[in-house]
Image (spheres, helix red, strand yellow):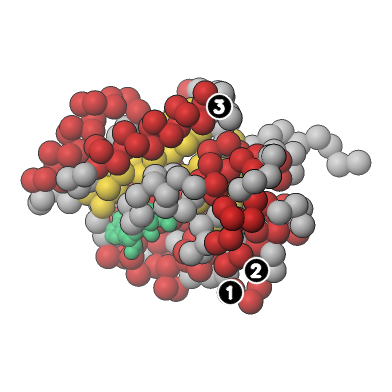
Amino acid sequence: MPPKLKRPRIVAIANQKGGVGKTTTAINLAAALAVGGKKVLLVDIDPQGNASTGLGIDAANRKGGTYGLLAGEANLAESTLPTAVENLTIAPSVADLIGVDLEFGGTERREFMLRDALREQAQADVVFIDCPPGLGLLTLNGLVAADAVLIPLQAEFFALEGISQIMRTVDMVKRNLNPALEVEGIVLTMTDRRNNLSEQVTNDVRAFFKQLVFDTVIPRNIRVTEAPSHGIPVLLYDFRSVGAQSYLALAAEFMKRARAKKVLT
Ligand SMILES: Nc1ncnc2c1ncn2[C@@H]1O[C@H](COP(=O)(O)OP(=O)(O)O)[C@@H](O)[C@H]1O
Ligand SMILES: [Mg+2]
């Protein structure tokens, strides 16, 4: 028998709002930690599959993907593929995920499908779950499977309204489904220092959420947008870009916080 593995730190990347940088953060934070030597698994549960495509996984190679995992048709090892980044593997998304709400909405362990599939099996130091937009059954599965939730927040006018909604959902999940769920932190994305509104929102979010907000911000950067079409993280696409360097800084801060909480070494 293989030795008993220590359980990984499982972090869901969630925000009900689309287009705030969840997938970009999932890919690039995962890649930055992997480049730093951590074994990282990215679990893509968004039916759109942007994280899978962005890491160069052809739709033809995905087999059952995370649908098979949720449905209990495959185990994690069977659902996981390597990426162009050493130490970074992915459980890719498949289109069948679109039907999960309807198909499993009436089943008894509907919120625990991903948790059941990940907890005993993940052979990694860190697992990131890239959640879809919305607060449906897939996102709930992500929050129930996770130890903590990382919330990317785009620095724009409605940011504060959006964040109160995801915070309420996290509280609901803690009360009813996953009492141990923590908020890993809030990451401000697509910031723009030349834009007064972006600065104002950044200041407001920091004033309200204080140390929950990562010091590192991810500025708007064209290289971050270009990298996915090449199937690689921005770190491999343009190491010197502001985007790549920001995600490296975020990974360093993520590790510093995790070590302080003694959840990673
Ligand atoms: N730092 C950034 N600079 C420029 N564009 C970004 C940045 N982060 C994300 N984007 C772009 O914003 C869009 C939405 O990002 P994405 O990560 O897909 O959000 P979500 O997963 O929350 O829907 C994508 O087109 C992405 O390339
Ligand atoms: Mg996404």
- State how far apart marks 1 and 3 are (Cα): 37 Å
Which percent across, then down, holds residue 82? Answer: 64, 62
SS assignment at label 1: loop
Is residue 228 left or right of 154 when viewed as pictured?
Answer: right
Q: Name the residue under label 3.
A: 176
Q: In which quarter of the image is residue 254?
A: top left
Q: Disc number at residue 62?
A: 2
Amino acid type for the residue under numbered disc 2: Arg
Q: In terms of depth relative to the viewer, which is nearer, 228 or 161?
A: 161
Which percent across, then down, holds residue 206? Answer: 23, 30
Q: In terms of depth relative to the viewer, which is nearer, 187 or 240?
A: 187
Which percent across, then down, holds residue 110? Answer: 64, 43
Mark whose residue sits in front, 1 or 3: 3
Is residue 178 left or right of 192 when viewed as pictured?
Answer: right
Which percent across, then down, holds residue 125? Answer: 62, 40
Q: Residue furthest right?
A: 1
- Asked if the residue at tag 3 contacts the one at tag 1, i.e. Cβ–Cβ closer than 8 Å, the answer is no
In the rendered image, the vertical position of residue 16 relative to residue 176, given as above or below: below
- Asked if the residue at tag 1 contacts the one at tag 2, i.e. Cβ–Cβ closer than 8 Å, the answer is yes
Q: Alpha-carbon neighbours of circle 2 within 10 Å: few (<14), some, or many (≥20)?
A: some
Q: Quadrant of residue 23?
A: bottom left
Q: Quadrant of residue 89?
A: bottom right
SS assignment at label 3: helix
Quadrant (top left, top right, bottom left, bottom right) of the C terminus? top right
Q: Which residue is drawn at 49% across and 61% down?
A: 51
Q: Alpha-carbon neighbours of circle 1 within 10 Å: few (<14), some, or many (≥20)?
A: few
Q: Mark 1 points at which residue?
A: 58
Q: Inspect this view and state whether residue 124 appears.
A: no
- Asked if the residue at tag 3 contacts the one at tag 2, i.e. Cβ–Cβ closer than 8 Å, the answer is no
Quadrant (top left, top right, bottom left, bottom right) of the N terminus? top right
Amino acid type for the residue under numbered disc 3: Asn
Q: Residue at x 53, y 38 (%)?
A: 143
